[in-house]
Image: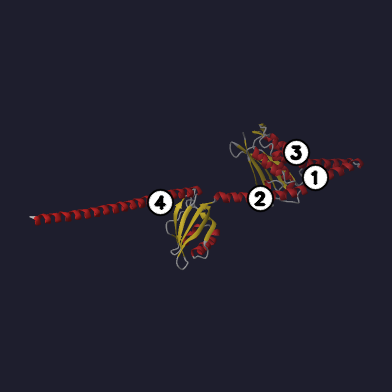
Amino acid sequence: MLKLCLYAHAVAALQVYLLWGLGILVVAFLVALIFRQRRTGDRLRGELAELAKLKQGNIEYEFILKAMRLATWHIDPLQRTLSMDNDFRDAQDNYTPPPATNLDVLPSMIAKSDADRVKAAMDDICTGRINTYHQQYRVKSGSVTGLTYWEDSIATIVDRDSEGRPTRIVGTSRRIDDQKNMEAALISARNKAEESDRLKTAFIANMGHEIRTPLNAIVGFSDLLPVVESEEDRNQIIKEIQFNNQKLLRIINGLVSMSKIEAEAKNLVKSQTNLVSVLKDIANVHAATVDTQNVALVTQFPYTELMINTDVNKLRELVDNFMSNAVKFTLKGRITLGYDLPDGEHVRIWVTDTGLGVAEADRQRIFDRFVKVNEYVPGTGLGLSVAKSHAESLGGKIGVDSKLGEGSTFWVELPLI
Protein backbone atom coordinates (compact mmCIF):
# COMPACT_ATOMS: atom_id res chain seq x y z
CA MET A 1 0.00 0.00 0.00
CA LEU A 2 2.83 2.34 0.88
CA LYS A 3 4.52 1.58 -2.44
CA LEU A 4 1.33 2.32 -4.32
CA CYS A 5 1.02 5.75 -2.66
CA LEU A 6 4.61 6.64 -3.40
CA TYR A 7 4.10 5.65 -7.07
CA ALA A 8 0.99 7.77 -7.40
CA HIS A 9 2.74 10.73 -5.87
CA ALA A 10 5.63 10.41 -8.32
CA VAL A 11 3.31 10.20 -11.30
CA ALA A 12 1.41 13.31 -10.19
CA ALA A 13 4.63 15.27 -9.77
CA LEU A 14 5.74 14.28 -13.26
CA GLN A 15 2.44 15.46 -14.72
CA VAL A 16 2.82 18.77 -12.95
CA TYR A 17 6.27 19.27 -14.45
CA LEU A 18 4.95 18.36 -17.86
CA LEU A 19 2.09 20.82 -17.50
CA TRP A 20 4.45 23.54 -16.39
CA GLY A 21 6.75 22.88 -19.30
CA LEU A 22 3.88 22.82 -21.72
CA GLY A 23 2.56 26.07 -20.26
CA ILE A 24 5.95 27.73 -20.62
CA LEU A 25 6.16 26.59 -24.23
CA VAL A 26 2.68 27.91 -24.95
CA VAL A 27 3.49 31.24 -23.33
CA ALA A 28 6.75 31.47 -25.26
CA PHE A 29 4.94 30.65 -28.50
CA LEU A 30 2.29 33.25 -27.79
CA VAL A 31 4.92 35.88 -26.98
CA ALA A 32 6.80 35.05 -30.18
CA LEU A 33 3.55 35.18 -32.13
CA ILE A 34 2.70 38.54 -30.62
CA PHE A 35 6.14 39.95 -31.53
CA ARG A 36 5.86 38.53 -35.03
CA GLN A 37 2.41 40.00 -35.54
CA ARG A 38 3.65 43.30 -34.20
CA ARG A 39 6.57 43.30 -36.61
CA THR A 40 4.26 42.31 -39.42
CA GLY A 41 1.86 45.12 -38.45
CA ASP A 42 4.70 47.64 -38.36
CA ARG A 43 5.89 46.47 -41.77
CA LEU A 44 2.37 46.67 -43.21
CA ARG A 45 1.88 50.13 -41.75
CA GLY A 46 5.20 51.19 -43.26
CA GLU A 47 4.26 49.74 -46.63
CA LEU A 48 0.88 51.47 -46.50
CA ALA A 49 2.61 54.75 -45.64
CA GLU A 50 5.03 54.27 -48.54
CA LEU A 51 2.13 53.39 -50.82
CA ALA A 52 0.24 56.50 -49.74
CA LYS A 53 3.39 58.56 -50.24
CA LEU A 54 3.92 57.03 -53.68
CA LYS A 55 0.30 57.67 -54.60
CA GLN A 56 0.61 61.28 -53.44
CA GLY A 57 3.83 61.59 -55.40
CA ASN A 58 2.12 60.25 -58.53
CA ILE A 59 -0.74 62.74 -58.09
CA GLU A 60 1.72 65.62 -57.73
CA TYR A 61 3.78 64.32 -60.67
CA GLU A 62 0.68 64.09 -62.86
CA PHE A 63 -0.41 67.57 -61.75
CA ILE A 64 2.98 69.01 -62.75
CA LEU A 65 2.77 67.29 -66.16
CA LYS A 66 -0.71 68.70 -66.71
CA ALA A 67 0.29 72.19 -65.57
CA MET A 68 3.29 72.20 -67.91
CA ARG A 69 1.32 70.48 -70.72
CA LEU A 70 4.03 67.86 -71.15
CA ALA A 71 4.14 64.49 -72.83
CA THR A 72 6.56 61.92 -71.36
CA TRP A 73 8.11 59.05 -73.26
CA HIS A 74 10.95 56.56 -73.08
CA ILE A 75 13.26 54.98 -75.61
CA ASP A 76 14.74 51.50 -75.68
CA PRO A 77 18.05 52.22 -77.46
CA LEU A 78 18.84 48.53 -77.99
CA GLN A 79 15.53 47.86 -79.74
CA ARG A 80 15.43 51.43 -81.14
CA THR A 81 11.78 51.91 -80.12
CA LEU A 82 9.89 54.79 -78.53
CA SER A 83 6.78 54.54 -76.34
CA MET A 84 4.61 57.31 -74.98
CA ASP A 85 3.96 57.20 -71.21
CA ASN A 86 1.77 60.29 -70.62
CA ASP A 87 0.40 62.95 -72.90
CA PHE A 88 -0.92 66.20 -71.45
CA ARG A 89 -0.12 68.42 -74.45
CA ASP A 90 -2.84 70.89 -75.40
CA ALA A 91 -4.61 70.98 -78.80
CA GLN A 92 -6.21 68.05 -80.56
CA ASP A 93 -3.95 67.58 -83.56
CA ASN A 94 -0.90 66.17 -81.75
CA TYR A 95 0.98 63.31 -83.34
CA THR A 96 0.95 60.40 -80.84
CA PRO A 97 3.13 57.44 -81.89
CA PRO A 98 1.82 53.96 -81.05
CA PRO A 99 3.69 51.91 -78.40
CA ALA A 100 7.12 50.60 -79.41
CA THR A 101 7.32 52.81 -82.53
CA ASN A 102 10.53 52.28 -84.46
CA LEU A 103 12.76 55.36 -84.29
CA ASP A 104 13.36 55.21 -88.04
CA VAL A 105 9.66 56.06 -88.58
CA LEU A 106 9.72 59.31 -86.62
CA PRO A 107 11.69 61.49 -89.13
CA SER A 108 8.88 61.01 -91.66
CA MET A 109 6.53 62.79 -89.24
CA ILE A 110 8.82 65.80 -88.91
CA ALA A 111 9.10 68.71 -91.35
CA LYS A 112 11.76 68.05 -93.99
CA SER A 113 13.88 71.03 -92.97
CA ASP A 114 14.13 69.66 -89.40
CA ALA A 115 14.12 65.87 -89.95
CA ASP A 116 17.85 65.32 -90.61
CA ARG A 117 18.92 67.43 -87.64
CA VAL A 118 16.56 65.66 -85.23
CA LYS A 119 17.49 62.20 -86.54
CA ALA A 120 21.21 62.92 -86.06
CA ALA A 121 20.64 64.09 -82.47
CA MET A 122 18.50 61.01 -81.72
CA ASP A 123 21.19 58.69 -83.07
CA ASP A 124 23.82 60.44 -80.94
CA ILE A 125 21.94 59.91 -77.67
CA CYS A 126 20.95 56.32 -78.51
CA THR A 127 24.59 55.39 -79.10
CA GLY A 128 25.76 57.26 -76.01
CA ARG A 129 27.79 59.91 -77.84
CA ILE A 130 25.81 62.56 -75.94
CA ASN A 131 24.11 62.35 -72.54
CA THR A 132 21.27 64.82 -73.15
CA TYR A 133 19.14 65.73 -76.14
CA HIS A 134 17.29 69.03 -76.79
CA GLN A 135 15.64 69.82 -80.10
CA GLN A 136 12.92 72.13 -81.45
CA TYR A 137 11.20 71.07 -84.66
CA ARG A 138 7.96 71.11 -86.60
CA VAL A 139 5.75 68.03 -86.48
CA LYS A 140 3.16 67.09 -89.07
CA SER A 141 -0.33 67.41 -87.64
CA GLY A 142 -1.97 64.18 -86.56
CA SER A 143 -5.40 65.24 -87.85
CA VAL A 144 -5.03 67.87 -90.61
CA THR A 145 -2.96 67.07 -93.67
CA GLY A 146 -0.37 69.66 -94.63
CA LEU A 147 -0.31 71.47 -91.29
CA THR A 148 2.56 71.42 -88.81
CA TYR A 149 3.04 72.53 -85.23
CA TRP A 150 6.15 73.34 -83.20
CA GLU A 151 7.42 70.94 -80.54
CA ASP A 152 10.25 71.17 -78.00
CA SER A 153 11.78 67.87 -76.79
CA ILE A 154 14.31 67.14 -74.03
CA ALA A 155 15.73 63.69 -73.19
CA THR A 156 18.47 62.12 -71.07
CA ILE A 157 20.06 58.70 -70.51
CA VAL A 158 18.96 57.11 -67.19
CA ASP A 159 20.47 53.60 -67.45
CA ARG A 160 23.56 52.05 -69.04
CA ASP A 161 24.81 48.47 -69.23
CA SER A 162 28.19 47.21 -67.99
CA GLU A 163 29.82 48.36 -71.21
CA GLY A 164 28.43 51.87 -70.90
CA ARG A 165 25.84 51.54 -73.63
CA PRO A 166 22.48 53.29 -72.99
CA THR A 167 19.68 50.90 -72.06
CA ARG A 168 16.93 53.42 -71.22
CA ILE A 169 16.31 57.02 -72.25
CA VAL A 170 13.49 59.17 -70.88
CA GLY A 171 12.24 62.42 -72.33
CA THR A 172 9.50 65.04 -72.45
CA SER A 173 7.86 67.00 -75.25
CA ARG A 174 5.69 70.10 -75.27
CA ARG A 175 4.08 72.30 -77.89
CA ILE A 176 5.62 75.73 -78.36
CA ASP A 177 3.40 77.24 -81.08
CA ASP A 178 2.69 80.35 -78.98
CA GLN A 179 6.40 80.85 -78.31
CA LYS A 180 7.30 80.53 -81.98
CA ASN A 181 4.46 82.83 -83.02
CA MET A 182 5.66 85.40 -80.51
CA GLU A 183 9.22 85.09 -81.78
CA ALA A 184 8.03 85.53 -85.36
CA ALA A 185 5.95 88.56 -84.37
CA LEU A 186 8.90 90.13 -82.56
CA ILE A 187 11.19 89.52 -85.54
CA SER A 188 8.58 90.98 -87.88
CA ALA A 189 8.11 94.00 -85.61
CA ARG A 190 11.86 94.54 -85.42
CA ASN A 191 12.22 94.28 -89.19
CA LYS A 192 9.34 96.70 -89.70
CA ALA A 193 10.85 99.13 -87.19
CA GLU A 194 14.22 98.95 -88.93
CA GLU A 195 12.58 99.37 -92.33
CA SER A 196 10.46 102.25 -91.05
CA ASP A 197 13.53 103.95 -89.61
CA ARG A 198 15.36 103.54 -92.92
CA LEU A 199 12.38 104.85 -94.87
CA LYS A 200 11.97 107.81 -92.52
CA THR A 201 15.61 108.72 -93.02
CA ALA A 202 15.19 108.50 -96.78
CA PHE A 203 11.91 110.42 -96.52
CA ILE A 204 13.48 113.31 -94.60
CA ALA A 205 16.36 113.48 -97.08
CA ASN A 206 13.93 113.37 -99.99
CA MET A 207 11.43 115.80 -98.50
CA GLY A 208 13.85 118.71 -98.65
CA HIS A 209 14.24 118.14 -102.36
CA GLU A 210 10.49 117.63 -102.93
CA ILE A 211 9.56 120.90 -101.23
CA ARG A 212 12.50 122.88 -102.58
CA THR A 213 11.78 122.03 -106.23
CA PRO A 214 8.32 123.64 -106.55
CA LEU A 215 9.29 126.40 -104.12
CA ASN A 216 12.31 127.35 -106.24
CA ALA A 217 10.10 127.40 -109.30
CA ILE A 218 7.54 129.63 -107.58
CA VAL A 219 10.20 132.05 -106.30
CA GLY A 220 12.10 132.08 -109.59
CA PHE A 221 9.09 132.69 -111.82
CA SER A 222 7.68 135.27 -109.38
CA ASP A 223 10.95 137.25 -109.59
CA LEU A 224 10.84 136.98 -113.38
CA LEU A 225 7.21 137.99 -113.74
CA PRO A 226 7.63 141.81 -113.28
CA VAL A 227 10.23 142.09 -116.03
CA VAL A 228 8.37 140.07 -118.65
CA GLU A 229 6.57 142.28 -121.14
CA SER A 230 4.99 139.73 -123.48
CA GLU A 231 1.44 138.85 -122.45
CA GLU A 232 1.86 135.32 -123.75
CA ASP A 233 5.05 134.84 -121.71
CA ARG A 234 3.41 136.30 -118.62
CA ASN A 235 0.48 133.89 -118.93
CA GLN A 236 2.87 130.98 -119.33
CA ILE A 237 4.82 132.04 -116.23
CA ILE A 238 1.60 132.42 -114.24
CA LYS A 239 0.55 128.96 -115.35
CA GLU A 240 3.87 127.51 -114.15
CA ILE A 241 3.53 129.31 -110.81
CA GLN A 242 0.00 127.95 -110.35
CA PHE A 243 1.15 124.43 -111.29
CA ASN A 244 3.97 124.50 -108.74
CA ASN A 245 1.64 126.03 -106.15
CA GLN A 246 -0.64 123.03 -106.54
CA LYS A 247 2.32 120.66 -106.38
CA LEU A 248 3.62 122.24 -103.19
CA LEU A 249 0.13 122.25 -101.71
CA ARG A 250 -0.28 118.53 -102.39
CA ILE A 251 3.02 117.82 -100.62
CA ILE A 252 2.01 119.86 -97.57
CA ASN A 253 -1.47 118.31 -97.55
CA GLY A 254 0.09 114.85 -97.58
CA LEU A 255 2.24 115.68 -94.58
CA VAL A 256 -0.68 117.22 -92.71
CA SER A 257 -2.95 114.27 -93.51
CA MET A 258 -0.40 111.77 -92.26
CA SER A 259 0.15 113.69 -89.05
CA LYS A 260 -3.59 113.82 -88.31
CA ILE A 261 -4.61 110.45 -89.64
CA GLU A 262 -4.21 108.40 -86.45
CA ALA A 263 -5.90 111.00 -84.25
CA GLU A 264 -8.86 111.31 -86.61
CA ALA A 265 -9.19 107.64 -87.57
CA LYS A 266 -12.32 107.24 -85.42
CA ASN A 267 -13.57 110.79 -85.92
CA LEU A 268 -15.80 110.25 -88.93
CA VAL A 269 -18.36 112.74 -90.15
CA LYS A 270 -20.66 110.70 -92.36
CA SER A 271 -23.40 112.06 -94.54
CA GLN A 272 -25.51 111.04 -97.54
CA THR A 273 -23.50 112.06 -100.61
CA ASN A 274 -23.87 111.68 -104.36
CA LEU A 275 -20.75 109.68 -105.23
CA VAL A 276 -20.92 110.54 -108.92
CA SER A 277 -20.83 114.28 -108.19
CA VAL A 278 -17.74 113.84 -105.96
CA LEU A 279 -15.92 111.76 -108.58
CA LYS A 280 -16.72 114.27 -111.34
CA ASP A 281 -15.24 117.11 -109.25
CA ILE A 282 -12.06 115.11 -108.71
CA ALA A 283 -11.80 114.30 -112.42
CA ASN A 284 -12.22 117.97 -113.36
CA VAL A 285 -9.46 119.05 -110.96
CA HIS A 286 -6.97 116.57 -112.37
CA ALA A 287 -7.93 117.19 -115.97
CA ALA A 288 -6.00 120.45 -115.73
CA THR A 289 -2.80 118.60 -114.72
CA VAL A 290 -2.85 115.97 -117.46
CA ASP A 291 -0.75 116.25 -120.62
CA THR A 292 -3.75 116.16 -122.93
CA GLN A 293 -1.57 115.62 -126.02
CA ASN A 294 -0.37 112.22 -124.76
CA VAL A 295 -2.84 111.18 -122.05
CA ALA A 296 -6.63 111.01 -122.12
CA LEU A 297 -8.55 111.29 -118.85
CA VAL A 298 -11.98 109.66 -119.01
CA THR A 299 -14.70 108.62 -116.56
CA GLN A 300 -16.83 105.49 -116.48
CA PHE A 301 -19.98 105.77 -114.36
CA PRO A 302 -22.75 103.16 -114.80
CA TYR A 303 -25.26 105.51 -113.10
CA THR A 304 -25.54 109.28 -113.12
CA GLU A 305 -26.34 109.27 -109.40
CA LEU A 306 -25.37 106.97 -106.54
CA MET A 307 -25.99 107.87 -102.92
CA ILE A 308 -23.46 106.70 -100.34
CA ASN A 309 -23.24 107.30 -96.60
CA THR A 310 -19.61 108.21 -95.94
CA ASP A 311 -17.13 110.84 -94.81
CA VAL A 312 -16.87 112.98 -97.94
CA ASN A 313 -13.54 114.61 -97.07
CA LYS A 314 -11.79 111.28 -96.49
CA LEU A 315 -13.36 109.79 -99.62
CA ARG A 316 -12.31 112.78 -101.71
CA GLU A 317 -8.73 112.66 -100.41
CA LEU A 318 -8.54 108.90 -100.97
CA VAL A 319 -9.61 109.06 -104.62
CA ASP A 320 -7.55 112.22 -105.16
CA ASN A 321 -4.43 110.28 -104.15
CA PHE A 322 -5.32 107.55 -106.64
CA MET A 323 -5.67 110.13 -109.40
CA SER A 324 -2.47 111.98 -108.46
CA ASN A 325 -0.59 108.70 -108.57
CA ALA A 326 -2.02 107.85 -111.99
CA VAL A 327 -1.20 111.28 -113.45
CA LYS A 328 2.35 111.11 -112.08
CA PHE A 329 3.18 107.68 -113.55
CA THR A 330 1.22 107.81 -116.83
CA LEU A 331 3.17 109.47 -119.63
CA LYS A 332 1.13 108.09 -122.51
CA GLY A 333 -2.22 106.40 -122.94
CA ARG A 334 -5.30 106.75 -120.75
CA ILE A 335 -6.44 107.30 -117.18
CA THR A 336 -9.94 106.12 -116.30
CA LEU A 337 -11.86 106.96 -113.13
CA GLY A 338 -14.92 104.85 -112.49
CA TYR A 339 -16.97 102.74 -110.12
CA ASP A 340 -19.09 99.61 -110.12
CA LEU A 341 -21.34 97.70 -107.71
CA PRO A 342 -20.01 94.20 -106.99
CA ASP A 343 -23.02 93.51 -104.74
CA GLY A 344 -25.92 95.38 -103.23
CA GLU A 345 -23.97 96.54 -100.16
CA HIS A 346 -20.65 97.87 -101.47
CA VAL A 347 -19.30 100.19 -104.15
CA ARG A 348 -15.93 99.64 -105.82
CA ILE A 349 -14.16 102.83 -106.93
CA TRP A 350 -11.16 102.43 -109.19
CA VAL A 351 -8.58 104.34 -111.18
CA THR A 352 -7.01 102.55 -114.14
CA ASP A 353 -3.95 103.86 -115.97
CA THR A 354 -1.54 102.78 -118.69
CA GLY A 355 1.51 103.91 -116.77
CA LEU A 356 4.63 102.18 -115.45
CA GLY A 357 2.84 99.52 -113.41
CA VAL A 358 3.85 97.95 -110.12
CA ALA A 359 6.02 94.87 -109.67
CA GLU A 360 4.41 91.96 -107.82
CA ALA A 361 6.94 92.19 -105.00
CA ASP A 362 5.96 95.83 -104.35
CA ARG A 363 2.15 95.49 -104.40
CA GLN A 364 1.79 95.05 -100.66
CA ARG A 365 4.43 97.44 -99.38
CA ILE A 366 3.41 100.22 -101.75
CA PHE A 367 0.68 101.15 -99.24
CA ASP A 368 3.19 101.51 -96.38
CA ARG A 369 4.40 104.89 -95.18
CA PHE A 370 7.31 106.58 -96.96
CA VAL A 371 7.58 103.82 -99.59
CA LYS A 372 8.63 104.90 -103.09
CA VAL A 373 9.10 102.09 -105.59
CA ASN A 374 10.66 104.50 -108.07
CA GLU A 375 13.10 106.91 -106.47
CA TYR A 376 13.45 108.90 -109.71
CA VAL A 377 9.81 109.98 -109.78
CA PRO A 378 8.94 112.99 -107.56
CA GLY A 379 6.76 112.25 -104.55
CA THR A 380 6.72 111.84 -100.77
CA GLY A 381 5.63 108.21 -100.54
CA LEU A 382 2.66 109.21 -98.37
CA GLY A 383 -0.29 109.37 -100.76
CA LEU A 384 -1.16 105.67 -100.93
CA SER A 385 -0.51 105.25 -97.22
CA VAL A 386 -3.04 108.01 -96.51
CA ALA A 387 -5.48 106.35 -98.93
CA LYS A 388 -5.13 103.00 -97.12
CA SER A 389 -5.72 104.58 -93.71
CA HIS A 390 -8.81 106.40 -94.98
CA ALA A 391 -10.17 103.21 -96.58
CA GLU A 392 -9.79 101.28 -93.32
CA SER A 393 -11.35 104.05 -91.24
CA LEU A 394 -14.33 104.07 -93.63
CA GLY A 395 -14.77 100.32 -93.14
CA GLY A 396 -13.47 99.34 -96.56
CA LYS A 397 -10.49 97.66 -98.14
CA ILE A 398 -7.92 98.80 -100.68
CA GLY A 399 -5.74 97.10 -103.26
CA VAL A 400 -3.98 97.23 -106.60
CA ASP A 401 -4.02 95.06 -109.72
CA SER A 402 -1.03 95.72 -111.91
CA LYS A 403 1.43 94.37 -114.41
CA LEU A 404 4.85 95.97 -114.67
CA GLY A 405 5.13 98.08 -117.82
CA GLU A 406 1.43 97.79 -118.70
CA GLY A 407 -0.37 99.89 -116.11
CA SER A 408 -2.27 99.58 -112.85
CA THR A 409 -5.74 99.62 -111.36
CA PHE A 410 -5.94 101.01 -107.85
CA TRP A 411 -9.25 100.27 -106.18
CA VAL A 412 -11.13 100.72 -102.93
CA GLU A 413 -14.26 98.90 -101.86
CA LEU A 414 -16.53 100.79 -99.44
CA PRO A 415 -19.89 100.06 -97.82
CA LEU A 416 -22.82 102.00 -99.24
CA ILE A 417 -24.31 102.57 -95.79
Q: Nearer the viewer, mark 3 or mark 4?
A: 4
Which residue corresponds to mark 3? 285
Identify which residue, 408 or 120, lies in the foreground. 120
In percent of width and height, residue 100 lies at 42, 59
Pointer 1 residue: 211
Give the residue type that dot 1 points to.
Ile
* Label 2 – label 1 distance at C-alpha: 31 Å
How far is disc 4 from disc 1 in space, using C-alphas? Answer: 85 Å
Q: Identify residue for label 2.
A: 190
Count of numbered marks: 4
- Could you say whether the residue bearing mark 1 is in a helix, strand or loop? helix
Which mark is first along the chain, 4 or 3?
4
Tell me which label, 2 or 1, sits earlier in the chain.
2
In the rendered structure, the answer to whether residue 407 lies left or right of residue 10 reads right
Question: Residue 332: in sight, yes or no?
Answer: no
The quarter of the image holding the C terminus is: top right
Q: CA distance from mark 1 to mark 3?
A: 21 Å
Residue at x 73% of width, y 43% of height: 324
- Mark found first going from the N terminus, 4 or 1: 4
Residue at left offset 50%, top offset 58%: 155
Residue highlighted by disc 4:
50
351 horizontally vs 53: left or right: right
Secondary structure type for disc 4: helix
Question: Which one is earlier in the sequence, the residue at label 3 or at label 2?
Answer: 2
